[in-house]
Image: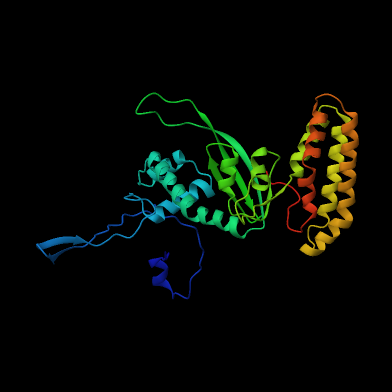
Amino acid sequence: MDLTDPALAARGELIGWDESRQLRRRRGGFFIVVKRTAKYRVAAAEGTTVLGVESPKSVVSRGMLHTSALAWLAVEKFALGVPHYRLERHLDAEGVPLDRSVMCRNMEEIGNALGSTVVGAMLDHARSCCQVLSTDATGASIQPGPLDGGARRPCKKGHFFTIVADCDHVLFEYASEHSSKVVSELFKGFTGYLQSDASSVYNILERGPPELDDKGPTLVGCWAHCRRYFFDAAVCKYKVGLEGVVRIAALYAADNALANLPPMERKARRLTALMPLVDDFFQWVAAQARLERGRSLATKALGYAQNQEAELRRVLEEPAPPRQHTQ
């Protein structure tokens, strides 16, 4: 935009410009793409027929939104946290009316496509190539659809398995139940270290009847879960709980000091710096378990540590297993 003055131009010579800049906005960025698919009349055995050009594959089949519009909606919703009702109002002000229900359906389609392709490939890669998987399952209420157009059915409990693969990426897998069968299918083919809580559903991976020449994962205990039980006991004024938290904190501090070392050096240093603390911890647990009587938060914490001793000690076996379970 040039600002000139005819009166000044008539009186003198233009010798230059003073420039300044301001951010300006043009209305909207959406436009309609008209896609025309050619049709041809071609000869056939019984005369002529009409054939159309095959359309390229789309993320959403027969959808009204272009891939670029879907990408914009996904970024606004999931990367920037803008809810659909606010996007609906924003687009309406831009002269692009788009109902939030349409946005929801398209985002669901994108999620299904992403889960069946990219995320599915990531999970296959984690099972076949990763050395350490950390997992935990969280229950969630699921609303099933009505039966044959009848009344709504009550919510049922489903489970989302969180899987941290080599601390590089996080995957989520839904299952209708939390069972040994689901765990067997979810981690089938994985032969590395699997870090989990003490749920019995994971025992089949290491202790169940293996198939011929089928090596399963090695179960690793979770010090964070162990610490949680001692913390609960400490909150309720049990001395055993407080001392357990202090001892586990010392284990964390000793291991954190080795975090930046090369893997093999970290393994060697763990054996000299961490193993004595681990041995002392489980000796203390065994001694306290003989003194504590009845059922309490203290005996629960001690029992968890005793039952998981073999799995918790596996953090010392190899340099790769993480120090704690990611929750």
Q: Where in the figure is residue 125, as x and y percent of width and height?
A: 57, 58
Q: Is residue 27 visible?
A: no
Which image quadrant for residue 146? top left
Question: Residue visible at 90% across and 45% down?
Answer: 280
Which image quadrant for residue 321? bottom right
Apparent side of residue 178 relative to residue 92 in the rendered image (left or right): right
Question: Residue visible at 63% across and 58% down?
Answer: 130
Apparent side of residue 234 relative to residue 212 in the rendered image (left or right): right
Figure check: 193 above or below 11? above
Apparent side of residue 92 relative to residue 258 in the rendered image (left or right): left
The image shows a total of numbered marks equal to 0
Question: Residue visible at 46% across and 57% down?
Answer: 24
Which residue reaches farthest front?
Answer: 212
Task: State the quadrant of the N terminus.
Answer: bottom left
Colour theme: rainbow
Camera-nearest residue between 197 and 65: 197
Q: Where in the figure is residue 153, as x and y percent of width and height?
A: 44, 26
Q: Is residue 181 visible?
A: yes
Figure check: 245 above or below 251? above
